[in-house]
């Protein structure tokens, strides 16, 4: 179902709060646009040449515009302090515990998303840059005991419903931007830097992973897919991927 302003479905627990803020900002912009439009028409009529044949150097004495500016400033402060900052603080400071979440590593490269799951042991294996090749884009060291059951995919992210997800994002080459429109998630993937994001999927389905940062000539085809499924389906998918190792 399409949301207000043509936004995509709200597929994460925090998506509604993001959309509410977007809606409030658009209402404020609409009111300002309509107000300035009305004021513009008023000035054209009020100060037309036939009504004012000579210039008036005294100007307007009313302080109405000042009051209106104060009201707009107060509304903007309320939006910032009452909505934006608390929402941002929740996304940045209140991460769920890793033992209660699905933890995944995503490594961007021109022009693909490499997804790394820790396997049943819950431990991520070592990665070695010297092992990176076409068949092993993450450079996963399979001789490491923790890496033996690790699962890797390219451009395919599977997640369970109603369980927090923590994704650690980085890049092998240039700056990319990991964007999940239905989850209201957008985070730059920066070489040499690991940045975590988290969300809780609440709507099953197949969705797009996009790159929101121009990253080279093949940027247009840097597209992945995200499948949100029940916990049982997710476990079955993990078993299927593990059996193929």
Image: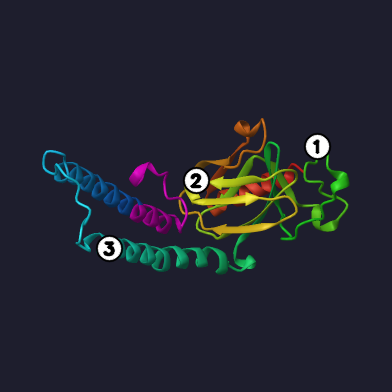
Q: Circle 3 sits in a helix, a strand or a loop, which is it?
A: helix
Q: Residue 185's spot in the image, x, y percent?
A: 53, 52
Q: Nearer the viewer, residue 107 or 40?
A: 40
Residue beneath disc 1: 135
**Residue at 64% over, 39% down:** 155
| C-alpha span from label 2 to label 3 | 39 Å
Magenta stretch: residue 57 in it?
A: no
- Label count reads 3
Of pointers 2 and 3, the one earlier in the residue sequence: 3
Of pointers 1 and 3, the one earlier in the residue sequence: 3
Q: Quadrant of residue 81?
A: bottom left
Q: Is residue 2 visible?
A: no
Mark linked to residue 66: 3
Q: Residue 125's spot in the image, x, y percent?
A: 79, 56
**Residue at 43% over, 56% down:** 18
Q: Residue furthest left?
A: 51
| C-alpha span from label 1 to label 3 | 65 Å
**Residue at 80% over, 41% down:** 136
**How would you rate the neighbour count of disc 1 (Cα within 10 Å): few for under 14, some for 14-19, many for 20 or more?**
few
Asked if disc 2 and disc 3 are in contact, CB closer than 8 Å, the reply is no
What's drawn in magenta, residue-wise? 1-25
Left or right of residue 213, residue 173 in this image: right
Q: Quadrant of residue 2?
A: top left
Magenta stretch: residue 9 in it?
A: yes
Between label 1 and label 3, give the one nearer the viewer: 3
Q: Residue 109's spot in the image, x, y percent?
A: 71, 41
Q: Nearer the viewer, residue 203 or 105?
A: 105
Q: Residue 149's spot in the image, x, y percent?
A: 77, 52
**How would you rate the neighbour count of disc 2 (Cα within 10 Å): few for under 14, some for 14-19, many for 20 or more?**
some
Residue beneath disc 2: 181
């Amino acid at each position: 179902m399409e949301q207000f302003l043509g936004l995509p479905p709200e597929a994460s627990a925090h998506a509604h709060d993001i959309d509410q803020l977007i809606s409030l900002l658009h209402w404020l912009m609409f009111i300002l646009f309509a107000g300035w439009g009305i004021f513009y028409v008023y000035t054209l009529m009020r100060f037309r040449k036939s009504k004012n044949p000579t210039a008036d150097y005294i100007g307007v004495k009313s302080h109405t515009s000042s009051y209106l500016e104060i009201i707009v400033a107060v509304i903007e402060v309320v939006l910032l302090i009452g909505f934006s900052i608390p929402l941002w603080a929740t996304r940045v400071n209140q991460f769920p515990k890793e033992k209660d979440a699905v933890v995944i590593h995503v490594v961007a490269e021109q022009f693909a998303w490499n997804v790394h799951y820790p396997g049943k042991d819950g431990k991520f294996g070592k990665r070695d840059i010297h092992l990176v090749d076409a068949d092993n884009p993450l450079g996963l060291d399979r001789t490491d005991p923790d890496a033996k059951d690790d699962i890797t995919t390219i451009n395919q992210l599977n997640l369970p419903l109603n369980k927090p997800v923590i994704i650690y994002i980085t890049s092998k080459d240039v700056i990319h931007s990991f964007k999940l429109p239905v989850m209201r998630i957008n985070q730059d993937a920066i070489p040499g830097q690991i940045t975590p994001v988290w969300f809780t999927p609440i709507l099953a389905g197949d969705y797009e992973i996009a790159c929101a940062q121009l990253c080279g000539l093949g940027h247009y085809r840097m597209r992945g897919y995200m499948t949100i499924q029940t916990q049982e389906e997710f476990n079955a998918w993990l078993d299927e991927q593990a059996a193929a190792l």
